[in-house]
Image (cartoon, rainbow, N blue to C red):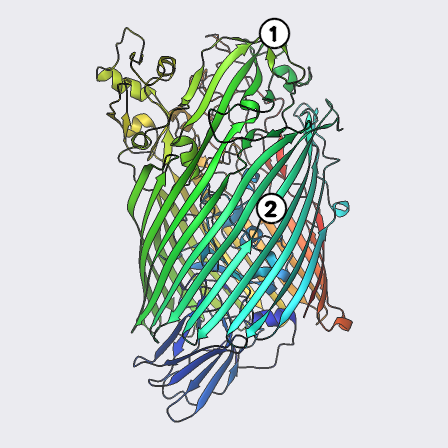
Amino acid sequence: MPASIHSNRCKRTALCLALAAGLGLAGLASAQSNAAGAIYGRAAQGDTVTIENPATGFRRELTVGADGNFRAPQTPSGSYTVTLRRADGSVRVRERVAVSVGTGTQVDFGGGDATTLDAVTVTAGAINPVDVSSVESTTILSAQQIASIPVARDATSVALLAPGTVRGDAAFGNLASFGGSSVAENAYYVNGFNITNAFNNLAFAQIPFEAIAEQQVKTGGYGAEFGRSTGGVVNLITKRGTNDFEAGGAAYWTPSSLSGRTPDIHLNNGDLLEDNAKDDAEQSSVALWAGGALVKDRLFAWGIAQFARNQTDAWGDVNAGRNTAARTRSPTWLLKLDWNISENHLLELTSFSDTARTTRTVYGNGEGALDRTGVLGTVHTEQGGTSHALKYTGYLSDDFTLSALYGYGKFSRSIYGISANGTRQEWSGDLDAPDTGCPVIVDQRLSTLLGATPAIHGCDFIGGTLGRPDAGDTRRQFRVDAEWQLGDHQLRFGYDADRFTSVAGGAVEGGQVWTYATIDPDGVPLNGDDTDFAVNVVFKNGATVDVNQRAFYVEDSWQVTPNFLAYAGLRWDSFENRNGLGQAYVSIDNQLGPRLGFAWDVNGDASFKVFGNAGRYALPLTATVAVRGASASIFSQQLFFYDSVDPATGAPVGATPFTPVTYLNNEFGANKDPRTIASENLQPMYQDEYILGFQQRMGEHWSLGLRAVHRKLQRAIDDNCDERAIYDWALGNGFVDPDGDPFQAPEDSTVPREIAFVNPGFTFCHLYNPGSDGIFNIDIDGDGTLEKVTIDADTLGPKAKRTYSAAEFFFEGHWDRLFLQGSYTWARSNGNTEGGVKSDIGQADTGTTQDFDYRELMLGAYGPLPNDRRHTLKLFGNYEFNERWSVGGNLLLQSGRPINCFGVYGSDPLHYGASYFSCSDAPGSDDDGDGVLDNGTDVVARGGGGRTPWQRQLDLNVAWKPAFADGRLTLKLDVFNVFDTRTVTSVVETAETNEGSPLFGTVYKVPTGFQAPRAVRFMVQYAF
């Protein structure tokens, strides 16, 4: 049944045009192509249905089959005219039929007796019919809708409008978390091309914001076509040329003078830690675009060039000795070519670039003051690159459609520094290369933390790890998809292959880190018995690594009855990870992902749908795992007493070691045997998901729905570094003399004797499935022969656990001048692992965080996870007063995130410092003289520190189209965080120093992040 049979009710406003195009869809969408939609419906057998887009010349003619059904798959997004020609010569027309990405649009002409239908024009002010061809949970927003609401100009901010999404930790770029998963578990596409950066899954290629025609956000229940994601899918469809020439330009400016200010930060004792009075940020961008037909109805082009500039001044910690000024320039572009070779064959090319270059100037900062004492150096980074995707679509018959895509992308992650004297500092990736620059200095002495003595500073300026100037990634992707209509069965099947190569590596600036700390035997600071010491850490790695991924899928959407759709799908995933020598260290085949679902059109008129699905979703290992975990690397630690400090470099003078050199994880620069990296019985990780819900159209203008979601992580992959179980195995199997030195390497061993002694036998961390036995190949005695060591699951640690349960209420309303959309989500996310990354400490080692390294680290780890937000209300929309004026709004109310209490467990025999779910405000004692206080082993479970406050934010905008410009000129003002609320979004969760001294009176729970302050954005746009 049509959305409405009324006509000429909607005036020619931007909002109405957006809705008339049918792009304002939300809720559930069908399992169509990830770059197109479909038109389907019913008519009489033998009738001819013609589907035509006047703007592009796209045209398909179908003959209605014996069952009375017709379907046009792989139909590009847009507005169509659908014409029915009956055998008696009568004609029926449906105009402005909307098609959006991934959706099925129903156009029913009825059976043979439906001859009384007149021509129909769909009303733009009416809500779209419920998509009863769908089992997915999807939100789709058009370019017009996105432009009408106050939202940041990036795909992540738009994705966060969808139900079930929350903003992740700032340490990972504020990416979106979907359904309790970590921010490193999402997939991103542009016109069907996978743009996810598989190096660590924490980035994706960007396109100019004005180039987005539609953004589809899949939050769950997606079909077998989509894989390599246990979070969500963000699917971008770009604009394309039409027979009508169009061009335009827009300028945006966010001045610092109108922005709010981040609050100052004080220690718990009242002392000033950060003075943010001088912090400054300004953003501006300019975009120009044009598009049209190169050959009418046949060849089209659309292109855009955009230049953005961001400038920031960050002063920060008054005791840090450093402050920075950064400037980022982002010249981006996109070109879209479409060639209608014939009515049955299409070819399209998408090319775009998102290179961003940042220059960060680092200044010295006077102790306890906000000043700039001179330039220490500049840091130069380059991110992004260029991508190309060529896609063919062939309508080989009325019932069979084939598409094929090849894509190539090359991306940079370059970083290097230039010191004040002009010396270039960079890391070549060669472990034998000499170190350059000043060592990194970290001052964690109690006297500094308590403000009794000035902090020690050096001449380092990079800010930690020095990357490679040639660091980057290359992607080669191929996929083929087919759709075959067999009566009531819509079969889809396909294959995709993805090869991702990464050049990566890093080393700490100056080759080493000196961390100053304090031994406080009685736990009472500054009472005369304290002893300062220095910890020396050397860290460096470098390799070129590969991830090869391939998958097959098949799915069937079976129209069991006219009102009931059953869906079944199966996905086969395989992946292979290679180290720096090109050797495979993990190879997993036949990861099966079954998907089931149903959609019940209860009333038979697309007004009320009950739906459900169950699916299994998997995620491969990222490329970053191999750089350190499977390739040569160095990671050493040694403790020193010292006499004084070099005032120029900050390094200790007269340093005397009081511990031997420890090669953590035995990373001493040797290549790793690929057979020893992972457990022999390693299985792929996967997560199961279940959704049940309904969606109902409430009259002509409203629709609403409710769905229940449950996700459970069934199996994970992580690394374990516990050598104690290996020692016990070796002892029980005759490899160790109980009365001699454990694991003393034989004279002819290739492993240095001091290394084999310090870290016996267990040469590095091993990948395994937490909760399963580990079967590790290890050269226990250094004779060149690998021993097969089996360690039971309980010894290694607990099973990985993560569950997410939610109830999502979503709604939308469309009128001639108003659209309103929103959701309320109650959710609970519990477990002992967040997933790919660890927001608790900002650890971005995707897939190999410190979780499960040792079983002690997992004591108390179960509880509310970092992305747990129990309550979230989202409401956004736009109202047009008339053809000249409109206002938009965006409201977010969200409860806070859990807070942990990290500290030292016992006397920290594992040397992980304040990384355990154990903390105490009572002073401990250093009974063994190792410099670490033993504060006991009391466990404070995950989330035991409470929660951050609720976040409340209202964004508003107003737009004006002057009459003299005939609607071509738009002036708009966006105000974000209108009331300038400054809610704390993250805090220090470390309650003890690495030496066990309590921090409750100084930095524990001190804010580290705030809600973004008020910002004002001006826009001028002219389009014709």
Query: In the depicted view, which residue is nearer to us: 784 or 818?
Result: 784
Residue receiving disc 2: 356
Q: In front here: 306 or 611? A: 306
Instruction: Please identify the residue farthest to the left as the structure is shown.
Output: 733
Three-letter code, disc 1: Asp
Towards the viewer: 200 or 416:
416
Q: Is residue 95 visible?
A: yes
Residue hosting label 1: 643
Left or right: residue 485 versus residue 222 is: left
Q: CA distance from mark 1 to mark 2?
A: 45 Å
In the rendered view of the protein, which quadrant contains the C terminus? Answer: bottom right
One can see residue 996 in this view: no
Residue at 63% x, 49% y is 330
Disc on the earlier residue, 1 or 2:
2
Q: Position of residue 135 (x, y in %)?
A: 39, 61
Q: Is residue 784 above or below residue 985?
A: above
Q: Quick one: quadrant of the N terminus?
A: bottom left
- Residue 902 is situated, as x and y percent measured from the top left of the image, at 51, 26
Name the amino acid, label 2: Ala
Check the image and report above or below for 116 versus 1018. Answer: below
Task: Residue at 50%, 43% (x, y): give it.
Answer: 202
Q: Residues within 10 Å of mark 1 (few under 14, many from 20)?
A: few
Q: Nearer the viewer, mark 1 or mark 2?
A: 2
Quarter of the image where one finds residue 859: top left
Using the image, tell me which numbered label, if any, was put on residue 60: none
* SS under mark 2: strand
Image x and y of residue 837, in percent: 46, 37
Q: Tell me where residue 615 appears, x and y as whole percent.
A: 35, 53
